[in-house]
Amino acid sequence: MTCTLTTTARLRRADAVSGDPVAGTTDFTPILDGGDPVLLELGARLRASTGSDLEFLREAHRWIQQRIRPVYSLNETQPASATLAKGRGSCSQRIALLEALARGAGLATRSEALLIHGSFWHPRFRYLRRAVPARILVAWPDFRLDSGWVNLSDLFEADAKNPAQAFANQGAETLFDAIATGSAHWVSSGCAEGSCMPADLAQVDRSLGRFADRDAVFARYGQNLPGIMRVLLEPVFGRWAAKG
């Protein structure tokens, strides 16, 4: 069971954008503030130790995975520089940090707005599942490399001989961690051809389309909880370690 009362009105009536997928951009935004001097310095260090754009993104992911503590923070619009300064962040905030580092390194990104069934998070919130929103909005990015657009799910190739099982969203492994194991893929039966990721989490209600950045996603559809709830819960959830 999920809760329609904690699902915002904007998400309940969310409509998909029409038209061709956006081109993406390297522009900095309030969330993807990759021009922050500390972020630029970090990106330059990671870039110097890698030989290609794909290697840079993988190294940046590993750096965030090892140094930014996973928590259940609720603020989807937190600047990436704030996540870095705090040393902790939700999966969404850690993904935003990876995007900001990419843009700071001159790599264009874009975001697909995915509505995920709230039940996907039930294993994480076993005793709070009745309060989980019916739908959760996720901004899932693509990165522009020389070979074309590469989805976040595909930054790390899974071992063909030992294919990763679908991410179960429980235990110590977070969704951000699962990217490195090849198990963080989505699938939906209701998406337009070429819109959703062809894999096996099978938790997508529908795709709302692709946007130039995650700022545009949350500006159009709002965040995942009503504002007053985020304010009240953030002091706890923003420090609650995501360890299952």
Image (cartoon, grey):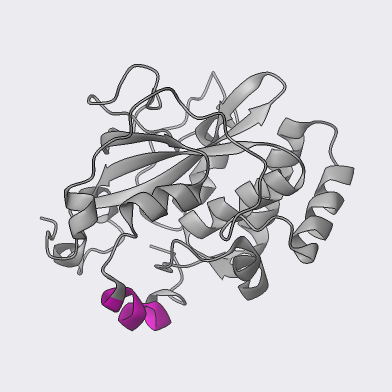
Q: Is residue 169 visible?
A: no
Q: Residue at 47% x, 55% y: name it.
A: 92
- Residue depicted at x 27% and y 56%: 123
Foreground of the two, 226 or 135: 226
For the question of whether residue 210 can be seen, the reply is yes
| Residue pictured at 69% horizontal, 40% vertical | 57
Horizontally, is 151 left or right of 201 in the view? Answer: right
Q: At 45% from the left edge and 48% from the top edge, which residue is drawn? A: 216
Eyeballing the image, is 226 above or below 162? Answer: below
218 magenta-colored: no
Residue 122 percent location from the top left of the image: 24, 56
Reply above or below: 13 against 20: below
Q: How many marks?
A: 0
Viewer-side residue, 227 vs 135: 227
The magenta-colored residue range is 228-236
Tell me where residue 172 appears, x and y as whole percent.
Answer: 46, 58
Tell me: 107 left or right of 141: right
Secondary structure mostly seen in the magenta stretch: helix
Q: Residue furthest front?
A: 19
**Quadrant holding the C terminus:** bottom left
Q: Give the vertical position of 210 relative to 46 (above or below).
A: above
Residue 132: quarter of image = bottom left
Residue 211 locus on image (x, y percent): 46, 38
